[in-house]
Image: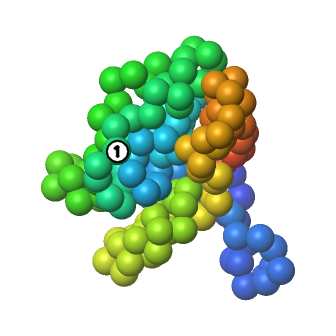
Amino acid sequence: MAEPAPEPPPELFPDAPPKKRRVQSVLFMCNYNAVRSVAAEAIARAYFGKSTYVQSAGVRSGEPTDPFMIAALDEVGIDASRHRPRTIEELEDWEGLNFDLIITLAPEAHHRALDLTHTLAADVEYWPTPDPTLVQDASREQRLDAYRDVRDGLTRRIKARLKT
């Protein structure tokens, strides 16, 4: 069987978009690792957990995993009930920060990830994601809808970004 032709050097096609390499490990970051990054981790594990190493962490500690997000994920068959929030420092102490890609979901997390990449060889992408906990003065169903919107938006982006 013939070997595939080598790819031409990028300088021959300066306007071509850079070829994205397959992500083997991804870290999702938000403020507390209780809502958005929990959802992103659970979704990515559900769809890509056999081919991609997935973790999540927050910039700060102090919030439990949000029951509305657990319920919204449960509706689509994803169980996040055993998730325990952790900070980026706890994750670093536990296993180190060896990720190909860090996806941040909140401004504070994005700034922290950029600080981290001064010493890490990881790409950082910022996916601005609304905080569904801000929907307070609403019915339970309206609040759940905000979580569903976040869940569905993250699902679309994760499927598009991590597909091989």
| Left or right: 127 in relation to 100 | right
Query: What residue is at 83 percent from the left and 80 percent from the top?
Result: 15
Where residue 80 sits, quadrant-wise, is top left
Q: Is residue 37 left or right of residue 73?
A: left
Q: Tell me the residue that label 1 is attached to.
A: 63
Vertically, is 13 above or below 107?
below
Residue 114: percent from the left, percent from the top?
A: 45, 75
Number of labelled discs?
A: 1
Location of residue 2 by image quarter: top right
Which residue occupies 77% across, 70% down? 17
Between 26 and 128, the one lying in front of the other is 128
Q: Which residue is drawn at 34% across and 44% down?
A: 63
The x and y percentages for residue 130 are 65, 52
- Quadrant for residue 60, please give it: bottom left
Q: Give the farthest residue toward the front.
A: 137
Kindly identify the residue that appears in the image at 72 percent across and 30 percent down: 142
Any part of residue 121 in sight:
yes
35 versus 98 height, above or below: above
Depth order, front residue of 76/94: 76
Image quadrant in which the N terminus is located:
top right
x%, y% of residue 13?
A: 81, 79
Residue furthest to the left: 93
Would you say 90 lies left or right of 5 here? left
Type of amino acid under label 1: Glu
Q: Quadrant of the C terminus?
A: top right
Asked which secondary structure carries label 1, the reply is loop
